[in-house]
Image (tube, grey):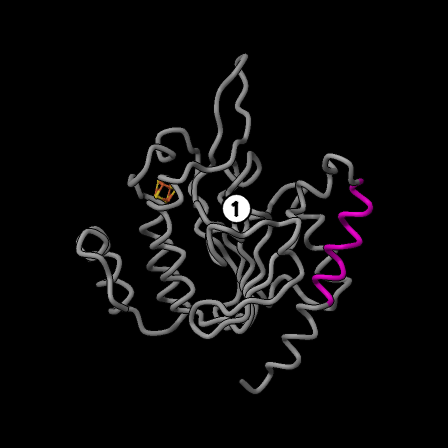
Amino acid sequence: MSLPARERELFAPVDADIAAAGSRAAKLAALARHVRVCELCPLSRSRRHAVPGEGSARARLMIVGEGPGASEDDTGRPFAGRSGAQLDRMLADAGILRRSTFITNIVKCRAADEAGGRWHNRPPRAAEVKACRPYLARQIAILRPRVILCLGAWAGRSIIGPGFGIGSGRGRWFAGPSQSDVIATYHPAYIQRGGPGISGKRLERLARADLESVSRRLKARKTT
Ligand code: SF4
């Protein structure tokens, strides 16, 4: 991996610990330890728990969301709240067990603003995504998943490219990092809310079709 000098310098301790770890699981755990104490962007100041991600170290499917919400910030686990329950249901219906996947986010700490005495989730800022991106890149390099499923536009933009749009781009396959195939679908939280001019039910039908496509692609790439 050819890295910019600044990233090489900042992530030297992370890379040293990953290199010293033996198995994939140990490498992922080493990275997670660094994430939990990371202060590379302002999100470290408002988080309760960083959320490195979790799942099988042999996962062929990596699922990447936007960032932790309140439940995830409380527990330190990805997709722990209502969105997680929705995701688990849709995965199971497509024949995919959550425990066989690895789930993470493009930023590992909750992005939220305080207003009226409450914290409200917001999309991560470009600088926050940029600061956190090296962790995701290393998780992908360690896992080398066959398929990456992006949940929501922000995850799609981060992995597929800055011009990605969820309305026109969801359900399509792209070449991804580490020889993966990448697809994006709607984020479970968006499905639960519904969008402008589109009901949650319709969004869920489309997302379920995308997960069926993921299931077929995983079967097709069994030997690659
Ligand atoms: S969001 Fe990422 S870069 Fe920012 S503090 Fe958390 S782990 Fe570090």
Q: Quadrant of the N terminus?
A: bottom left
Q: Picture quarter containing residue 82?
A: top right
| Region rendered in magenta | 199-212
Closer-to-camera residue (28/130): 130
Residue receiving disc 1:
154
The quadrant of the rendered image in which ligand 1 is seen is top left
The location of residue 22, given as percent across then percent down, is 32, 74
118 over 196 or under it: above or below: above
Residue at the image position 67 percent from the left and 41 percent from the top: 190
The location of residue 154, given as percent across then percent down, is 52, 46
User: What amino acid is labelled 1 in the image?
Assistant: Trp
Q: Is residue 214 left or right of residue 25?
A: right
Residue at the image position 26 percent from the left and 57 percent from the top: 14
Specify whether residue 78 is painted magenta: no
Closer-to-camera residue (152/73): 152
The location of residue 94, given as percent across then percent down, is 75, 65
Q: Is residue 148 left or right of residue 127?
A: right
208 over 147 or under it: above or below: above
The location of residue 98, given as percent across then percent down, is 63, 61
Residue at the image position 64 percent from the left and 41 percent from the top: 81
Residue that extends furthest to the bottom in the rendered view of this protein: 223
Q: Residues within 10 Å of mark 1 (few under 14, many from 20)?
A: many
Q: Secondary structure at mark 1?
A: helix
